[in-house]
Amino acid sequence: MRILATESGGIVSVKVIIPHPNESGSRKDESGSIVPANFVKEGMVMLNGKPLLELQLGPSVSKNPFFQFKFAGKKGDKLSLRFLDSSNQEYSAEAAVV
């Protein structure tokens, strides 16, 4: 997972890319077999150990999803991100605001 968190004027802008295939379960492969569903289904963003944002996602999210959000914060704040996919694989990362 790649995270960029920058502060300007007391507002932190966060950009996140999650490397994930995000298959909906409705696409067929070259042989005509349905590709099993596997998508990011939920996410949690913590700021300095406290919940900041919760996400509920579904099969319509794109491959390698990109998320962007802003909040009031400062340089040095610590972000922790955790995402879970439909096969219960966890993706997590941490970043400090610069």
Image: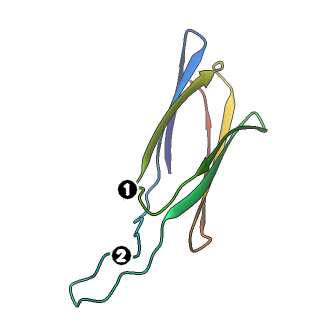
User: Is 70 on the left-hand or right-hand side of 54?
Assistant: left
Q: Label 2 is placed on what type of residue?
A: Ser
Q: Residue 62's spot in the image, x, y percent?
A: 37, 56
Instruction: Choose the circle earlier in sequence order: 1 or 2.
Output: 2
Residue 32 sits above or below residue 3 on the image = below
Count of numbered marks: 2
Q: Specify whether residue 82 is in view.
A: no
Q: Residue 92's spot in the image, x, y percent?
A: 62, 54
Residue drawn at point x = 69 percent, y = 33 percent:
78
Q: Residue 40's spot in the image, x, y percent?
A: 52, 61
Residue drawn at point x = 60 percent, y = 27 percent:
97
Report the Cα–Cα distance between label 1 and label 2.
14 Å
Q: Residue 95's spot in the image, x, y percent?
A: 61, 38
Q: Residues within 10 Å of mark 1 (few under 14, many from 20)?
A: some
Asked which quadrant contains residue 24, the reply is bottom left
Query: Observer-nearest residue: 37 or 20?
Result: 37
Asked which quadrant contains residue 84, the reply is bottom right
Q: Residue furthest right?
A: 50
| Residue assigned mark 1 | 62
User: Is 88 on the left-hand or right-hand side of 4?
Assistant: right
Query: Observer-nearest residue: 81 or 57?
Result: 57
Q: Nearer the viewer, mark 1 or mark 2?
A: 2
Query: Observer-nearest residue: 37 or 11?
Result: 37
Instruction: Check the image and tell me how it is coloured.
Output: rainbow
Residue drawn at point x = 22 percent, y = 91 percent:
31
Residue 89 sits above or below residue 44 on the image = below
Q: Label 1 is placed on what type of residue?
A: Ser
| Residue assigned mark 2 | 26
Q: Tell me, for residue 41, which label it has, or none.
A: none
Q: Specify whether residue 4 is in view.
A: yes
Marks 1,2: beta carbons within 8 A: no
Residue drawn at point x = 50 percent, y = 51 percent:
1
